[in-house]
Image (cartoon, helix red, strand yellow):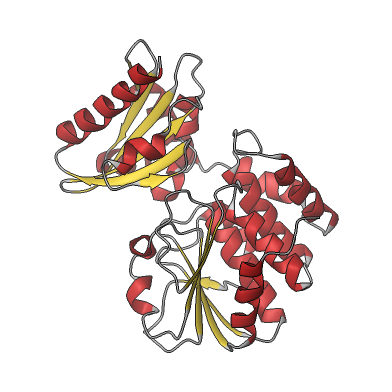
Amino acid sequence: MKARLKIIDRILERIAQSQSICIVGHIRPDGDCVGSQLGLAFALQKEGKDVYCWNENQMPNKYAFLDPDKVLRKPGRTQDFDLVIAVDCASYDRLGSLGEAVSRRKYLINIDHHQSNTRYGDLNWISAREASTGELIFRLLRTARWPITPAIADCLFTAVSTDTGSFQYSTTKPVTYHTAGELVKLGANLEKICHEVYQSYSLSRVHLLQHVYNHFHLGHHNQIAWLWLKKNDFVRTGADRDDTEGLIDHIRAIEPVVVACIFEEVETDSIRISLRSKSPRINVNTILSQFGGGGHASAAGARIAGTARAVQRKVIDAVKRALDAAT
């Protein structure tokens, strides 16, 4: 049993003092963000709180099974909150339009596991040791001795599973398996989660995967793999932005590749970058921090202004320097 943390006691004290609570997460939410938001929201609802659960973007289709009552919504009008809790969000600007929507708050708590977190809350619980924010929410609920229902267990198991690459990434620790095991005991439905999250690809995603395998590039002695996703690729395949989650793992899995990169055209002169590393010697958080991005040592992202050619050159050159320095 882990020692009780004072930061958790401070969070629980602030929750006890609050009635209207809004739980927010980062733009383009992934499984850890959605699962952490919903798991905490369901728990607080059972504690009699007036709970709002907001994200700038709509729920990705593959996680909709976690939220049959559509608790997670796009933000409403700006209103007063006793407390706002941000989960899995490394910086305040990553909240997108939520930043303004929750500006009339008394207090902000920031719960996250990203190494690059900017500690923007009035109270910050940042633990990069954990492989997912879902593990932090689980520990919070257990410390509070709040009931973890099967619905909450589904949310938190999804959070843990997706952010560890289904327990394949190097961030996965013994405590990660312990948390997952406890969630299964508490009713997490593994068959349903695996079917909805990993075995229900849309046809549009399959077409996007075809694009991945037909258009990826290799460089620097096959140690770097990269791919472009442009607006026309989404039009041609019928895919949407939700379909891109996990695509990078397909080129990351190529045997000689050490670093995988996806360049995604967001708007004119703005490129979204995702990097993944297979080597503990290559820290992609450090690489993308040069461009105002961040994340984890093995997975990081950034949004960079510039032309496609200029952005690609800058990022690939930075990756090459890191690879050369590590040899």
| Residue drawn at point x = 48 percent, y = 35 percent | 298
Say which quarter of the image contains residue 217: top left
On screen, residue 233 above or below 253: below
7 and 196: which is toward the camera: 7
Query: In the current view of this chain or complex, which residue is farthest to the top?
Result: 221
Asked if residue 170 lies left or right of residue 78, the reply is right
Q: How many marks?
A: 0
Residue 181 percent location from the top left of the image: 80, 48
Query: In the current view of this chain or complex, which residue is farthest to the right?
Result: 185
Residue 282 percent location from the top left of the image: 43, 27
Is residue 83 among what the camera can see? yes
| Residue drawn at point x = 42 percent, y = 56 percent | 28
Residue 228 percent location from the top left of the image: 30, 32
Asked if residue 194 lies left or right of residue 85, the reply is right
On screen, residue 229 above or below 99: above
Asked if residue 163 lies left or right of residue 325, the reply is right
Residue 89 percent location from the top left of the image: 45, 59
The image quadrant where one finds the N terminus is bottom right
| Residue drawn at point x = 41 percent, y = 26 percent | 259
The image quadrant where one finds the C terminus is top left
Asked if residue 155 lies left or right of residue 63, the reply is right
Is residue 68 among what the camera can see? no
